Image (cartoon, rainbow, N blue to C red):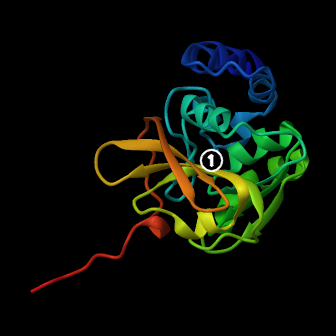
């Protein structure tokens, strides 16, 4: 399979047509080998409009959705970024000259994507997804959905920092952008999206008699 050609088709047919016009982001999407973030034997699906398995229950977010989320974050060279359950996003941001850390709870994910992240210059950390590694980030992004407001993630942003994530409590979900200000946090809905919800970011079931 010609992955370079498939990458260009992906950007032309899934990204540009969905109002992602930032040329730096487009260039990064054309450069990052998405096929290296797929489970063994699944590389052929890397550029299709599907969520491709990485390891266990973890999936790649569809290219259109992660591109629109990164575009909304307005990343700038030299900024710091944390990708929580978002290895492909981490590599794309690193390609845009940000200092990026990728956080996963399951080492099995890094057994698949670790080499690609290392080559991209991304630092990796294994830690529970509910608690970000470090703080003072300009950007936080996740390729997995959450069913509750991720307050710990928001708290890890510096003033002026931005978080993009999909909030989903049912069949549908919304990609949202949080911006941390000096006196509070703003929230803006971006577009419809339905990635798998991260188990660690769902409330525990409550039983009542």
Q: Where is mark 1, residue-wise?
A: 39
Residue at the image position 47 percent from the left and 66 percent from the top: 201
Foreground pick, 123 / 7: 123
Residue at the image position 90 percent from the left and 46 percent from the top: 78
Residue at the farthest front position = 183
Report which quarter residue 147 is drawn in. bottom left
In the rendering, at what x and y percent does residue 204 appear?
35, 76
Residue at the farthest bottom position = 209
74 versus 2 height, above or below = below
Residue at the image position 56 percent from the left and 28 percent from the top: 64
Position of 57 with respect to 205 (left or right) is right
Position of 197 with respect to 138 (left or right) is left
161 versus 172 height, above or below = below
In the rendering, at what x and y percent does residue 23 appear?
78, 20
Report which quarter residue 12 is drawn in. top right
Residue at the image position 84 percent from the left and 53 percent from the top: 122
185 versus 105 height, above or below = above
Foreground pick, 72 / 125: 72
Q: From the image, which quarter does the C terminus lie in?
A: bottom left
Q: Is residue 7 visible?
A: yes
Foreground pick, 203 / 176: 176
Q: How many marks?
A: 1
In the rendering, at what x and y percent does residue 39 appear?
62, 47
Structural crowding at the residue carrying mark 1, measured as other residues with C-alpha within 10 Å and reported as few (<14), some (14–19) or many (≥20)? many
Q: Is mark 1 on a helix, strand or loop?
A: loop
In the rendering, at what x and y percent does residue 148 appear?
41, 63
Q: Can residue 82 be seen in this view?
A: no
Position of 42 with respect to 76 (left or right) is left
Report which quarter residue 63 is drawn in. top right
């Amino acid at each position: 399979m010609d992955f370079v050609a498939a990458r260009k088709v992906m950007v032309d047919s899934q990204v540009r047509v969905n109002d992602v016009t930032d040329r730096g982001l487009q260039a990064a999407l054309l450069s990052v080998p998405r096929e290296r973030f797929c489970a063994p034997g699944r590389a052929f699906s890397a550029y299709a409009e599907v969520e491709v398995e990485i390891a266990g229950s973890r999936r790649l977010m569809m290219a259109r959705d992660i591109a629109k989320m990164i575009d909304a974050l307005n990343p700038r060279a030299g900024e710091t970024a944390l990708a929580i359950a978002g290895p492909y996003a981490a590599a794309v941001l690193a390609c845009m000259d940000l200092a990026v850390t990728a956080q996963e709870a399951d080492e099995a994910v890094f057994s698949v994507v670790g080499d690609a992240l290392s080559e991209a210059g991304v630092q990796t950390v294994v830690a529970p997804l509910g608690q970000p590694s470090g703080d003072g980030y300009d950007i936080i992004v996740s390729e997995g959905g959450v069913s509750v407001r991720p307050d710990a993630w928001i708290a890890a942003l510096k003033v002026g920092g931005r978080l993009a994530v999909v909030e989903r409590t049912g069949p549908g979900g919304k990609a949202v952008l949080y911006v941390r200000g000096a006196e509070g946090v703003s929230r803006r809905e971006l577009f419809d999206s339905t990635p798998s919800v991260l188990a660690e970011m769902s409330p525990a079931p409550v039983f009542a008699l």
